[in-house]
Image (spheres, grey):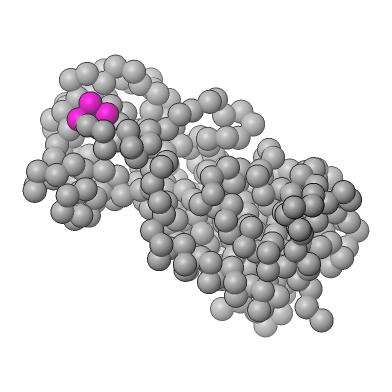
Amino acid sequence: MPRSATPADPARPPTQPPIVSSPLTTPAGSGTGTRGRSASYADAALGLLADRPLVVLTGAGLSTDSGIPDYRGPDAPPRRPMTYQEFVSGPTAQQRYWARSHLGWGRMRRADPNEGHHVLARIAPDLLITQNVDGLHERVGTPRLVALHGRIADVVCLSCRRTSARSALHEEMGRLNPDWHERHPSVHIRPDGDVDLEDTDGFVVPACGCGGVLKPDVVFFGENVPKDRVAHCYAAVDSLAERDGALLVVGSSLTVMSGLRFVRRAASLGVPVVIANRGETRGDPLATYAVETGCTPFLSALEQRRSRRSPAEIGTG
């Protein structure tokens, strides 16, 4: 008998909290938006994930232990990232972005993967979808990875579409703005790799060799995720329904549709969804379990559970 459960009717909010005594009796999408904090609730969620094929979706909360702040965690201050429309509006906006990002990248590229990144690489889910642009999953050799929003370590020209390494641009910006870091030694880094800085006058922004505007090869707010990436992720989620798998969301508030769509897809197919995050998420009402927890402790506990099972029992690969 398959253990995947009946999806919730999105037009009718459920009235009963999820049953936590057994992970096999909790229907997908049966959450009420109330997050579970008890050890027994987390244990039930781990039990559900212990022997299933997994697709994992990660967000900024996973990288906070690496010193990179998140957007919407419980202690995160309000932040307004630059939109794509602002960036392409003209040289002033581009100068403001790059003056900040040059400082932020100098710090972000020194961030190291934390234990949560290493655990996920060892678990090696069917597919790991990350909303993060920090490249930390790549650093630990995570197999079967989709960087949904791109990588801040890459740069693209908006005219000729040539991509190049951010490191080369960083060096060129340092040459053109030799004292920029010394003038701004105490800025606070943001999740998307820039910093809190108001005075950006005088910063020199190099152009592409073709004369075009350079932009980080990441999806800005107001910009669409490439269709082929979305299709690849949907296919992985769809396969979970056929293989009695589950979707695990770690460290994401699911505020933006780019990640939430996969939770909705899983719930519509009856695929169990577990969300492990500090703070409420938009996906909580669709989750089988929404666990109030830190990312790394939950993932470490999951690795221990799955290590007790043989590859054949888990059914990955």
Rendered view: 49 above or below 218: below
In this rendered view, identify the residue nearer to me: 217 or 165.
Answer: 217
Question: Magenta region: which residues?
Answer: 91-95
> In the rendered view, does 75 fall on the left or right side of 141?
right
Q: Main secondary structure of the magenta part?
A: helix
Rendered view: 101 above or below 45: above
- Magenta includes 103? no
Whether residue 153 is visible, yes or no, is no
In this rendered view, identify the residue nearer to me: 70 or 16.
Answer: 16
At 14% from the left and 44% from the top, the residue drawn is 212
At 73% from the left and 54% from the top, the residue drawn is 10
Q: Residue furthest left?
A: 210
Could you tell me residue 228's position as x and y percent?
40, 66
Rendered view: 219 above or below 129: above
Could you tell me residue 203's position as x and y percent?
19, 25
- Magenta includes 94? yes
Could you tell me residue 250's position as x and y percent?
62, 51
At 21% from the left and 48% from the top, the residue drawn is 158
> In the rendered view, does 268 fall on the left or right side of 155?
right
Where, by quadrant of the figure, is residue 202 drawn? top left
